[in-house]
Amino acid sequence: MSTQAMPRTGVWFQGGLKIKAATELAVRAEEAGVDSIWVAEGPVTRDAFITLSALALATNRVDLATGVVNPFTRHPAQLAATFTTLDELSQGRAICGIGIGARDGLIPLGADVSKPLTAAREMVSIIRSLLARDEVILDGAVFKMDHVRLGLRPYRESMPIYLAATGPKMCALAGESADGIYLMYGTQDYVKSSLSLAHGARTVTEPLRVASPILMAVGKNDDDSVTGVKIGIGLMLTEPNGEAMLEANGVDPALAQPIRDGLAQGGVKALIAAVDNSIIDRLTIVGTHAQCVERLQEVVSWGINEPQILLTGDDPSDLLAVLDDLKSSF
C-alpha cells in the first residue's frame, strides 16, 4: 500500500453529453465512490450549469465542478453569482472551474481574447472578491467594474477556484492566484515541469490542488472502447494551443492540423481517423485494468492528486472499477 495521501478521484463529461445521460452516469459514479464530477462547456454548446443543476438534484455527496467555463460568454461577476447559486442548490458542493476557454470558438462571437493571461488574472480576482462579499472596483485591461457586490448571500464563506492551464505562464498564474490547477494530462516531464512552475509561484501556505482530466480506455488500441478516447483528445487538439500541447509532450506538432482538417471536412469519423497512435500513447491511458491502475498510480506520484476520467459509452463499469482500485491502493 502506498504511503502517499489517497487521491480524490473524479469523472468528467464533455459538453456534448445529453443531460439525461450525464445524470445517469453521475449517479453511477457517486455510487462507485468518486469524489467529484466535472462538466465541460464550449462557447455555444450544452450549458454546463444547467447540467450541473440536474446532477445536484440527482446526487448527494460528490463535488460538482465546471471543467471549465470562461469569462467571455459569461462575465466574471455573473460567474460568481452562478457558482454561488449552484453551491446553494448542491448545499456546498460546487467547485469553480474556470479558464480562458476555446479561443477558436470565442473569436467568432466577437470576444477579444488577445490578453489571455490578463483576462485570467482579472477573472480570478473578481470571482474571489465577489464570493467573499467584497465590493469590487476595477479598471482593468480586460474588465471594468464600478462598485459591484454579489447580490445574494453565499452558502459558504469560500469556494475552491481551479484555473485551467497549459502553457508555462498560465501554470504559474494558477499556482499564484487559484486554489487549484486544472492541468491536461500528459507525459511525466510535461506534468512535473508544469507543476513545478505552479508550485514555484505559490505564496500561500495552503497546498495547491491538482486536478487533471484524463482520457482512459480499458482495452486495446484497436478496441471500440478507444473510440471515445480518440474523439476526446482529438477535440482538445483542435484548439489553438494544440501544437504547443503536442510539442510539450514530445509529439510532432504537425499532427494537430490533420485533426482539425478531418473534423472540418469529414466530421467526427474523419477526426477519429486523423488521431495518430503517438498521440494516444502520450496523452491518454489505454491498457488492461491492471495497467490502467498502475498508470494512474504513477500519475498521482507526479503530483496529480485529483485525477479525473472521461466517462464515455453506455457502461462505465470498467472505468469506475479502475478508480476504485486506485483508491484501494493507497
Image: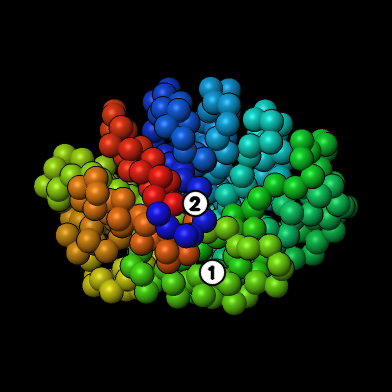
Sequence-first tag of 1 and 2: 2
Horizontally, residue 79 falls left or right of residue 52, namely: right
Question: Seen in the image, is 145 located left or right of residue 8?
Answer: right
Image coords of residue 148 (percent x, y):
84, 49
Q: Nearer the viewer, residue 135 or 260?
A: 135
Q: Position of residue 178 (x, y in %)?
A: 65, 60
Which amino acid, mark 1? Cys
Out of 197 and 81, give the one closest to the viewer: 197
Q: Is 122 displayed left or right of 216 in the figure?
A: right
Residue at image coords 82%, 35%: 152
Q: Which residue occupies 59% across, 55% down?
A: 162
Residue type highlighted by circle 2? Met
Q: CA distance from mark 1 to mark 2?
A: 24 Å
The residue indicated by pointer 1 is 171
Residue 179: give x, y in percent of width and height. Answer: 64, 58
Badge 1 marks a residue whose secondary structure is: helix
Question: Considering only vertical position in the picture, is 170 above or below 134?
Answer: below
Q: In this rendering, is residue 74 above or below 259?
A: above
Disc 1 vs disc 2: which is toward the camera? 2
Vertical placement of residue 100 versus 83, above or below: below
Q: Quadrant of residue 249?
A: bottom left
Q: Which residue is mark 2?
A: 6
Q: Which residue is found at the position 23% from the left and 72% from the top?
A: 252
- Residue 92 can be seen in this image: yes
**Which structural element holds mark 2?**
loop
- Seen at 28% across and 37% down, the residue is 318
